[in-house]
Amino acid sequence: CLADDGKLSSSEARVVAGLLQEGDSRLLAAYDVYVDSQDVDDLVDTIIRVAKRGVEAAGAPSAPERAPAGGDFASVFAEMAATQLTEVEAAALQLCAARKDPDLAAV
């Protein structure tokens, strides 16, 4: 559907299909948030972001880059997600940040 609408390239659609078959925790967390919020735009945005990262990761070197100490939110989040959070926790936190959740902003 997203590929038919031009929102995903064919390679991104293949990535999403593969991730869905694997039960990807990021996509499952996005769906759980959608069930609660009924925000289809947020769900579509998350699927597109996961697809783009999946395509990028397929062409990226296997060793992850380390985030610089004291960096911006994205680099701190990446470091924390890579070392301290499960995939589901990282996906849920990422969704909260993307939605600018007021509870997260208070921290």
Image (spheres, helix red, strand yellow):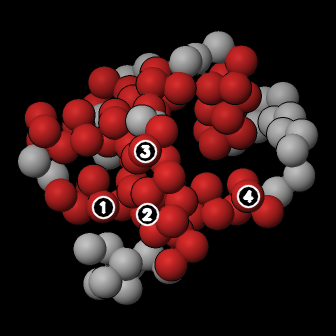
- Residue 12, given in percent of the width and then of the height, sits at 52, 69
**Who comes first in sequence, dot 4 or dot 2?**
2
**Element class at badge 2:** helix
Residue at image position (46%, 68%) is 13
Res 48 → quadrant: bottom left
- Residue 55, given in percent of the width and then of the height, sits at 64, 63
Amino acid tagged 3: Gln
Q: Nearer the viewer, mark 4 or mark 1?
A: 4
**Most extreme residue toward the front, as rendered?**
21
Query: Which residue position is annotated with label 3?
Result: 21
Amino acid tagged 1: Val
Choose between 73 and 81: the one closer to the eye: 81
Asked if the residue at tag 3 contacts the one at tag 1, i.e. Cβ–Cβ closer than 8 Å, the answer is no
Q: Quadrant of the N terminus?
A: bottom left
Horizontal side of 70 relative to 42 (left or right) equals right
- Report the disc number at residue 58: 4
Amino acid tagged 2: Ile
Distance from Cα at disc 2 to Cα at disc 1: 6 Å
Query: Which residue position is annotated with label 2?
Result: 48
Choose between 19 and 28: the one closer to the eye: 19
- Report the disc number at residue 32: none
Asked if the residue at tag 1 contacts the one at tag 4, i.e. Cβ–Cβ closer than 8 Å, the answer is no
**Who comes first in sequence, dot 1 or dot 3?**
3
Horizontal side of 103 relative to 62 (left or right) equals left
Q: Residues within 10 Å of mark 1 (few under 14, many from 20)?
A: some
**Element class at badge 1:** helix
Query: Which residue position is annotated with label 1?
Result: 44
**Element class at badge 3:** helix
Residue at image position (28%, 32%) is 102
